Image (cartoon, helix red, strand yellow):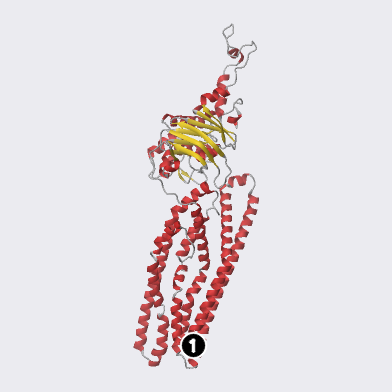
Amino acid sequence: MILAVRLSSELKTAVAPLRRTLLPILLISSVYNVLLLAGSFFMLLVYDDVLPSHSVPSLVSLLVLVMIAYGFQALLDVTRGRIMVHVGSMFMRSVSTRILDLVSEFELNRGPMPQGTQIVRDVETVRGYLSGPGPLAILDLPWIVVYLLILSVFHWSIGLLSLIGVAALVALMLVNNRLTAPLAQATVRASASRSNLAETTRRNAETIKALGMASARRIQWSAAEADYLRANDRFSYISSTMSGLTKAFRMFLQSATLALGAFLVIEGEATGGVIIAGSILSARALAPVEQVIANWKGLIASRLALGRMRDIMEAMPDRVEPMGLNRPGRELDVKALSSAPPGTRRVTLADVTFKLQAGDALAVVGRSGSGKTTLARVLCGVWPILRGTVRMDGATIDQWSADEIARIIGYVPQSIELFEGTIAQNIARFQTPPDRDAILKAAQAADCHDLIIRLENGYDHLISPQGGGLSAGQQQRIALARALYRDPFLVILDEPNSNLDYDGEVALGAAIGRVRERGGIVVVIAHRPSVIANVSHILVMNQGKVERFETREDFEKRIRPPAPIAKSGRPTGERTQTGKSDAATQQPSGTQAREQAMDDAGERTDIPAEIRE
């Protein structure tokens, strides 16, 4: 291959269509290189035949022929250049979908992606090199032998001088490779670190400004910038030095060839035409090597890029899309489930087992760090399973295709992220064509329809990468609508009320109720007691394990405090001789309503720590 690097089977498949263009390019290059001889032979005939004979018709004929040759030469050069541009585009199209899948899934399966999103830039690096003159220069290299043979026909000494020149340039090329390969890797690493720092700064601009971290960030940026410039400058210095030496050596060799030709003419061993023709042809013989050295930086960068792409693709092989199954509708069965953050073996979820039927809703409660969010991510297939199974109607999640999963699972993550586009597109998960009725139904189910239509342009309100001026609560309501789009069977909500006001919590409870009424299953990570009233089961977690799994009725019986004893010695609520209960005589009017409101708001102090935490 032009880039001379070991490819994975996946990359070999990606570049297979490119190989079909290799033979046409070789044929075109062959004719092109033959036509390049036209200038040398034109000068040889002019000096050795036309000038001695003083034949103007011969001169005109030769001029017409060389013009035709130059015309075809230009046409072939443009043609093969356009073919290489097409080759670069073909390569990019063949791997683009796979690259996006790697960017979106690698960290969820294997941990942090090496050098962040460098793989996206790697594809562009390879495409840019394939579309440029570098590969064509490599294809022209074999023609050096032809040029040297012709120079040897002129005179053996001219051929030997050109051979020495080619050998010297090849030696420079090898030295260039030896010096620049490690520097190219260092430059890429420094560039990736710099890009990641810029991205995290952009993403956390609000926090950086609020906490006065701008100065510290500038110091980090200056250090990253210095590392990048240091590596890049050394790489560029060596590349430019080698390129300059190559050009100077080629010009010297051309002059040396002229001097040698003049000496041969003086000695009577060559004609005047050999001087000019030999000089032109020797320059042409060195041109491919010079072009390869000039494009060496791109060649090394492309080889390294292909190597990184190969390593990442081999680390996460492409998954064959499953045949798919019918939409589930009966149960969710979790058995002995264990999981850990991608790329680590530190188990944060161990031996979790529970079973829910259609119409059930589960509240997962527990202290911070008890594994609740890990459970949510595993249930929707975001994080990998170390042991155990998650099944819907007896089938594991990976038996449905990605498009089918979009209709089966609705998910509100702990950290809400709306994507750049309209509110309607976000609710519809950017599926095309969007289902208008399903969008409206989802918004109404999340009780955010009125909220949306009050915005500028309503459902066509454009959301920018920073949230488009929406509050955290508004974004959370829209994210809930996105999760409810097209009535998924399993709805997973990770702290869906963290930014909601009282009306938002009421809407959330109603949404959970509607999912249950239509036979769906809801799993909600709960930090507020108000969610408990809308579920059928409670799962208490502690240090990644299930501490208790029970129905809401059993949970309420367990946490209900014993009736307080009144001064009369009877339990509160027992009738006195006057017919009034102690509770009625001791509590002011409206207390029960206030306690209920506090319970709804999560302010009750008699709620167990497993809920309040």
Q: Which image quadrant for residue 458?
A: top left
Q: Is residue 166 above or below residue 154?
A: above
Q: Which image quadrant for residue 394?
A: top left
Q: Could you say which is closer to the camera, residue 391 or residue 492?
A: 391
Q: Is residue 281 above or below residue 454?
A: below
Residue found at the very far top of the displayed protein: 577
Residue type marked 1:
Gly
Q: Which residue occupies 59% across, 8% down?
A: 576
- Judging from the image, what secondary structure is the residue with disc 1 in? helix
Quarter of the figure that contains the N terminus:
bottom left
Q: Position of residue 137 (x, y in %)?
A: 46, 71
Q: Which residue occupies 42% across, 85% down?
A: 43
Q: Which image quadrant for residue 10?
A: bottom left
Q: Position of residue 281 (x, y in %)?
A: 45, 81
* Badge 1: residue crowd in 10 Å (few <14, some 14–19, many ≥20): many
Q: Position of residue 131 (x, y in %)?
A: 44, 64
Q: Is residue 157 above or below residue 502?
A: below
Report the number of numbered marks.
1
Q: Position of residue 573 (x, y in %)?
A: 58, 13
The answer to whether residue 304 of the structure is visible from this angle is yes
Q: Is residue 600 above or below residue 260?
A: above
Quarter of the figure that contains the C terminus:
top right
Instruction: Say which residue label 1 marks.
Output: 261
